[in-house]
Image (cartoon, helix red, strand yellow):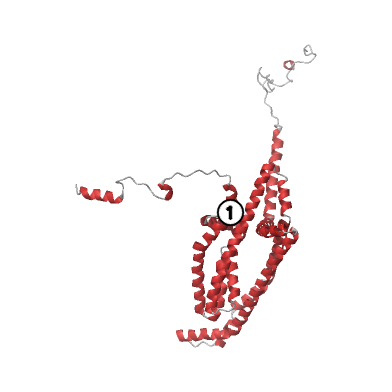
Amino acid sequence: MAPTDETGQTPQHAHAAPSGASPSDTAPPARPAAAGTAAPDTRMPRWLPRAMVLALGLIATFQLGSWAFHRLTGLLVNVLIAFFLALAIEPAVGRMATRGIRRGLATFLVFLGLVIVSAGFVALLGSMLAGQIVKLVEGFPDYLDSVIHWVNTTFHTQLRRVDVQEGLLRSDWLKKYAQNSAAGVLDVSAQVLGGLFQLLTITLFSFYFAADGPRVRRALCSVLPPAKQAEVLRAWEIAVDKTGGYLYSRGLMALVSGIAHYILLQALGVPYAPVLAVWVGLVSQFIPTIGTYLAGALPMLIAFTVDPWYALWVLVFVVIYQQFENYVLQPKLTSKTVDIHPAVAFGSVVAGTALLGAVGALIAIPAVATLQAFLGAYVKRYDVTDDPRVHGHRGREPGRGLLTRVRRLWGRGPA
């Protein structure tokens, strides 16, 4: 009978080894932990599951936000365009509202005027292009005869117009072009419908921003403390002034450009000179980066139908006027209306193009001008010391000039 302790339990060291088992087969008894040392805890920390769930939740939220942002990029860009368009028409809507007209009706009247002007311009341009296309088609045989006569005279060949026409009609590239054009009709239709839907979206958002401008500002300020409300309203007012000033400067440059090109086209006898002048003025100023080339291509084409040398004169005038506008006219108008340095304006256009394409290039200057004017109130400025180096005059010590050094070396002579 095994001995027991006072509690009635058999102590561990009193258990006998099973029969037939050697002492080496039995596991040694576990040693008790020394006094003052804790036994190792092999359980999972309580904070680890929560941390893992939180990390997975953050990753899922980031992925969902990234997916939604990429899906809504087009809508966000349209809203941004609509916001700047609403800022541009805010002065006109505000003046009409101060005279007792409701903001909704005032906004509608402004948009109606813009639609009428745009539709009239597109109608005049379309009729001009249609007339010129008909004229080109009717005069194509004469142009072809003149080209064939020049080739026969220059290279001593015997080409005929009938042979050239039959070769063009039976060529493989013409058949492939017709097939590709027929297949691309659906793509062009889809792009046109997408452009119309985008234009409708921008128009609706800009109408709401302009008509409900006070309500939007009140809703934005209601979630901010009074000190921040004044800053937001001040930034909004600066944005309205800078955007309006930018459009005002662009309108002035478009007017000057249109008048200059009208004088040239009228002097050369190019048809549709007024419409072409309006085209050059608007496209060159309100379409960034490539607007100048698009604006000059159409007058050159119309001038080519009159005389090929006229097209060359138009090209030379467009290049010269562009330099005059970039280095003389634009810096003066921009400094008075937008108050931004030409180098900063050019850099902002490049950055806006890299970020948002043509839309970024169009809204980059008013955005940078607004940011510059808003931050200028918080930058502490100091009086500049009256130092010649401020004005670009480098101070020189006497006897350190180049001529002095040459004279000294010449006076020493050979050693």
Foreground pick, 241 / 132: 241
Q: Quadrant of the N terminus?
A: top right
Q: Examine the rendered structure and indicate whether residue 372 appears above or below residue 322.
A: above
Q: Which residue is mark 1?
A: 369
Foreground pick, 371 / 77: 371
Q: Examine the rendered structure and indicate whether residue 415 appears above or below residue 7.
A: below
Q: Examine the rendered structure and indicate whether residue 220 appears above or below residue 6.
A: below
**Residue 382 image point, x, y percent:** 50, 43
How many residues crowd around disc 1 within 10 Å: few (fewer than 14), some, or many (20 or more)? Answer: many
**Residue 211 image point, x, y percent:** 73, 57
Task: Locate residue 117: give its quadrant.
Answer: bottom right
**Residue 275 image point, x, y percent:** 61, 74
Question: As drawn, which residue projects farthest toward the front?
Answer: 99
Q: Residue at x 73, y 49 (%)?
A: 218
Foreground pick, 302 / 96: 96
Task: Locate residue 87: give its quadrant.
Answer: bottom right
Residue 356 visible in the shown view: no
Task: Locate residue 290: give its quadrant.
Answer: bottom right
